[in-house]
Amino acid sequence: MSSISLTRHLIEAQRQGQLTPDLQLLLEVVARACKRISVAVGKGALGGVLGEAGQGDSINVQGEAQKKLDVISNDILLEANAWGGHLAACASEEMEHSQPIPDGFPRGNYLLVFDPLDGSSNIDINASVGTIFSVLRCPDGVTAAGDADFLQPGHTQVAAGYCLYGPSTMLVLTIGHGTHAFTLDREQGSFVLTKADLRIPQETREFAVNMSNQRHWEPPMQAYVDDLLAGKDGPRGKDFNMRWVAAMVGDVHRILTRGGIFIYPWDGKDPGKPGKLRLMYEANPMAMLVEQAGGAATTGRARILDLQPTSLHERVPVFLGSKDEVEAATRYHLQHDGAHA
Ligand code: AFP
């Protein structure tokens, strides 16, 4: 059977009324930008793109040292989306505020928010990294979209996806009709559908968490992980395996491929921060992809896609993956809260 390209997949979805021509254009533009980022990432040391941006003094709005590839990837996405007329504004992990489409270019009805290079601390060790993106509608009547226009709950997303720069480059995408995986055919230069309608197994024996933070977790998180580690002789009655890529895209892709639970909980290392991951361009898009594949995504207490954002870079605790396991972890938190209400 002839291969199905991303373009054909999107055209067929458009014929079924699942997306507008402008959204199709947006997704094709983002995919093309991800191909350019894949080339830059793939050059590694040969491309002069490793290491920190600036003189090592370039700090982003998160207070994190920017890598050269963080900045390069951000610029690639901004430039690619400037002229198409499909977007009203962009927002990014790497920019304090959203950026309207430059004057002189037509503006469209969508908002794009992204983490241009997630897991960038993996860059210098040649481990997997990725781009995460989320598409929202620009509110009716808004001609100059600003930060506040992005603050919509995750269930209003019209599309979400990531591009994983690993041994192969894969684009995983949802427009609300399932989650589908495309692999970059470097000879053709196009993304080809390699797995339609990903489904996450309901149950799992595999969890992903940075265990070095264990002493900083709140009691229900401690209790939940203790029971995982107790294995078949403990209350869970089965042994668990652990994986940690330190790039959310890599962990989520494994979970979409074979199940599991990914956790970045609240920790007391920095009590002012309710977790490490950002709602708008990490938790929300990943939650949509996971739910569209039959999984679940909560903060340990509430469905991520129902949260009302209050700021562009706000952080949330994240529990996502195999539905039964996410529900089990959430029960530990809700029972703890009920007992301590
Ligand atoms: P970086 O982009 O700073 O590498 O952070 C990646 C990330 O936001 C997410 O992709 C990982 O799941 C998580 O942080 C890893 O956090 P730790 O470095 O604390 O394990």
Image: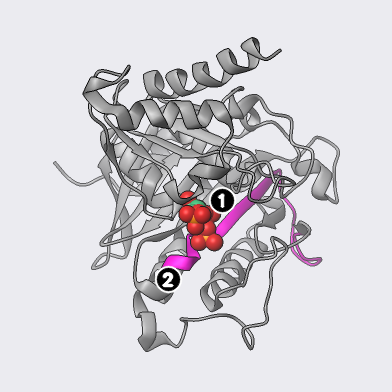
| Residue under the point 26% across and 29% down | 205
Query: Which quadrant holds residue 315?
Result: top right
Figure quadrant of the N terminus: top left
| Residue under the point 43% across and 18% down | 328
Q: In the rendering, at what x and y percent does residue 300 appear?
A: 56, 26
Q: Residues within 10 Å of mark 2 (few under 14, many from 20)?
A: many
Residues 46 and 36: in front is: 46
Residues 90 and 50: in front is: 50
Q: In the rendering, at what x and y percent does residue 331 appear?
A: 50, 16
The residue carrying mark 1 is 26
Query: Horizontally, is 96 left or right of 315 in the view?
Result: right
* Position above or below: 329 against 173: above
Q: Which residues are magenta?
A: 100-123
Residue 199: tell me if it is visible: no
Figure quadrant of the C terminus: top right
The residue carrying mark 2 is 123
